Amino acid sequence: MKLTHLLWSFVRRDALIASSYRVAFLAPLASVCFAVPILYFLAKIAPGTDAPSLSPYKSGFFAFILLGMAFQDYVTLSMSNFLSGVREHQLMGTMEVVMLSPTPVPLILLFSSAWGYLFTSLRFALYIALGMVFGLDLSNANLLSFALLTLTSIVSFAALGILGAAATLIIKQGAAITGLLTAATLALGGVAYPISVLPDWLQKVALVLPFTHALEGVRKALLGGASIRELSTELIVLAVFGAVLFPVALWVFGLALQHAKAHGTLGQY
Amino acid sequence: MLDAAAIEVDDLSQSYPVQQPLFSSFRSAPPATPVRALEHVSLSVRQGEVLGLLGANGAGKTTLINILCTLLTPTSGHARLAGHDVVLQPQAARRQVGLVTSNERSFYWRLTGRQNLRFFADLYHVPSGEADRRIDEFLDALDLSAFADQRFDGFSTGIRQRFACARALLHHPRILFMDEPTKGLDPNASAAMLQLIQQRILKVWQPTIVVTSHNLTDIEKLCDRVAILDRGRILRIGTIGELVRSIRSHEAYAVQATGVDQNTLVGLRALLGADRVRVRDDAAATLELGFGHNDRERCLSRALAYLLERGAVIQRCEPMDVSLEDVFRETVPQRKVA
């Protein structure tokens, strides 16, 4: 069985299920159509749109916050995708027949998240397209840098999400933990304001989050046209986060799975 | 093909810790005793055999199946499927297994029957070039073709169970676990499911089957051997004939006769043995006569001749069969519901 074929099978399953709920499928896309104008007009009235803290991004506040809001979707998704994947299987009753298959559990976990990332990428593209209608200037964008940075970021974010899924297997309500992590990311990661405006000690906390580095890199790549070499700091930080966190997350998930199997709580919710 | 052991279970035990209420730790409550779901279970199932697991709710049937399906890790002991240890070689063990669960929610209800089977075929590593052909084969064999492209949430319980069979067989497993396959089915659907298992699944694909059911008639019809579990232990295991003989060492006949007085009864007891003659129903004058398995015909003739000699009129004489239900009731003590 080719991995690409299996991956396609998961994506097809999840796309078919998602599109069968028509309103729930279209609403997240429609919400972008409202979000972008709101950000545009917010940027118009926000004071200090030419503040020195925005100068590294070579753009105004609208482009800054638009990319922040669009990219934070990846974090929100990562925090919920793996966790809800486990929980939905538990709630739907499909957990045991899926786990009974000879497909290794890490593959099931990762491939089950693929559709979520594809859909989020579609939303991101819609943010950008609508942003361009409202004047977002991406003429200098370096798409290769952006793509590499996004992939590296997703690995780091996914690791945190897998840890949340592991918590779900044990305590059944892992959303509380990942919700907290998402909130911290939004508050400290530089979504709506540059982290340079935060107090010094909070800036140090912000630098511990992979999202801070990812968003910084995304803005530099899309707005400033930064090359891979110019993004080396962000890429190295994210690669280290991913290289350490991802195997640890899979290992912890494996332990949580063993615990659930030993205690007979695999399908419980 | 009943030689090699398809399933070997050796001294398997499973216990679950009991979760204490959060505040009990502040009240220095004694730690709860773990629940023992299985205790020292050993059994062997031959290739191609159908084994029935019987037991009251909570007896440990589903726990045993879940361990064999690698969904539960046993506390101690070993289990092997076609030689693969379920703990040490779970991937290889899972390749041997198909599971028919009674859980109707084990499918994706927003997908069609065919879309569900297609996904599970890929998940269970059915070669991609073969998946569509196999799906069509099982849809046809299990009379599901008409439902293939309808959404799963519109199906009746009987159709869902048929799809569960199709899914379990897609990857050609050597061992099929069926956890209450007729649960929730009406009598007609239940009979159809049994027929399907006997005439299609067993005849065509010939897997080893372990089946649980609370319907003892189903078990009698399907199984080569039956294991009776209670509180995590196997109390009896054997063919239905062996189980019957294990609770009754003799064959019994019900003889309804008039004109049987006390002296005749005394004489009959002297003839057959005191413990082999029981008055079942005074009003209907029915006697229960027991005979050894080897001397049944000779003793029955002598007993009937004796009754006729003493002036009794025999109205009816019929063998009293021991059903699996009798064996079950004799084996598993009834407990009061708390």
Image (tube, coloured by chain):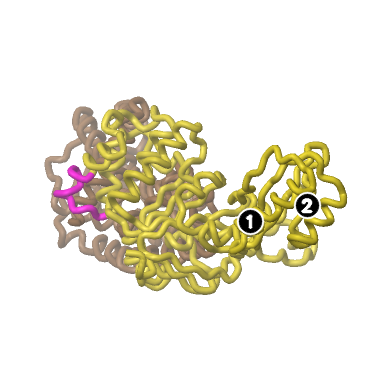
Residue at (15% x, 62% y) in the render: A229
Which colour is chain A painted? brown
Residue occupied by mark 2? B278
Residue A152, picture quadrant: bottom left
| Residue farthest along the right direction in this orientation | B262
- Which chain is tinted yellow? B
Residue at (50% x, 45% y) in the render: B218
Q: Position of residue B93 (x, y in %)?
A: 36, 65
Query: Over which residues does the magenta segment extend?
Result: B125-134
* Viewer-proximal residue among A195 and B50: B50
Say whether residue A185 is visible.
Answer: no
Residue occupied by mark 1? B251
Parent chain of label 2: B
Parent chain of label 1: B
* Mark 2, other Cα within 10 Å: few <14 / some 14–19 / many ≥20: some
Give the label on residue B61, or none: none
The stretch drawn in magenta includes residue A168 = no
Q: Are marks 2 and 1 on the same chain?
A: yes
Q: Position of residue B31 (x, y in %)?
A: 73, 66
Judge whether A214 appears above or below A117 on screen: below
Q: Position of residue B223 (x, y in %)?
A: 46, 53
